[in-house]
Each structure stands twice: as C-alpha cells, then as structure tokens.
Image (spheres, rainbow, N blue to C red):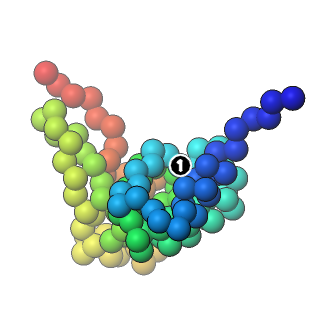
C-alpha cells in the first residue's frame, strides 16, 4: 500500500550529504512539518550553511524564530522589481528587546508584506 510522502525525509537526506552543493535553495521547507521538526530543520540548515550557501523562503513564524536578525534578507517588490535588503538592526533594537523575530514578522515590522502593484 502506498504511503504519503514525508517532507522531512527528503530534507534530512539532502542536508546529511557528506558533500553539499555550493548553493541550497529551499522554498518553504517547513510545510508539512511538526513544529518540533521545524526547530530540528533550522539546526540542520545552520549546520549545512557552514559548507554551503543556504537560501530559503519562508512565511513560518516558528522557523523565523530559530534565526537571528542578521540571518535575514527581506525581499520587497518595488516598481516591478525584487529588492533584497537586510532589516535595520538599529531601527528594530527596541522591538527585539521585547519580541521574537517571528513576532516582528507577524507585526509586519520586517517588511516583505504583499502589496498591490499599480500600473
């Protein structure tokens, strides 16, 4: 009898390879994972980032909470183009004293929120 795909299994196999590719790109790798597995995924991504450049797209508060502000690059759409920027640590310092990175994401303080394009 066929079994359902385990999204974590493929990521585990990829991130456990003895020789990782120079670049690993993942789109929402947390989908389908239990919250505790997301924490484990973040640790595996951190380990992989020692040997590879890791680029991932996420909207997960749980995954975001596993990283530091300087790990983030936020993508905004401006004038029909994607603009990549790091959040300003000075502007967010007071917020980070009271809130997690994921909470700042939920409060729309990090950017990257959808906007209608005019044109």
Q: Is residue 27 depicted above or below 67 in this figure?
A: above
Q: Identify the residue shown where x is 32% and y is 47%.
A: 112
**Residue matched to label 1:** 29
Figure quadrant of the N terminus: top right
Between 92 and 84, the residue placed more toward the observer is: 84
For label 1, the crowd category at 10 Å Cα-Cα, with few meaning under 14, some 14 to 19 and many 20 or more, is some
Figure quadrant of the C terminus: top left
Q: Secondary structure at mark 1?
A: loop
The x, y position of residue 104, in whole percent, is 42, 60
Q: Is residue 50 depicted above or below 57 in this figure?
A: below
Q: Identify the residue shown where x is 53% and y is 68%.
A: 18
Q: Identify the residue shown where x is 38% and y is 65%.
A: 52
Between 67 and 97, the residue placed more toward the observer is: 67
Residue 49: quarter of image = bottom left
Between 16 and 75, the residue placed more toward the observer is: 16
Q: Identify the residue shown where x is 55% and y is 55%.
A: 14
Of all residues, the one furthest to the right in this rendering is 1
Left or right placement of residue 75 versus residue 6 in this view: left
């Amino acid at each position: 009898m066929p079994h359902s795909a385990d999204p974590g299994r493929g990521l585990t196999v990829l991130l456990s390879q003895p020789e990782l590719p120079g670049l690993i790109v993942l789109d929402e790798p947390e989908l389908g994972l239990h919250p505790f597995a997301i924490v484990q995924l973040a640790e595996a991504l951190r380990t992989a980032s020692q040997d590879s450049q890791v680029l991932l797209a996420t909207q997960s508060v749980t995954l975001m909470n596993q990283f530091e502000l300087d790990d983030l690059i936020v993508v905004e759409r401006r004038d029909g183009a994607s603009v990549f920027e790091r959040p300003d640590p000075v502007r967010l310092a007071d917020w980070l004293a009271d809130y997690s990175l994921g909470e700042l994401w939920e409060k729309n303080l990090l950017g990257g929120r959808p906007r209608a394009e005019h044109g």
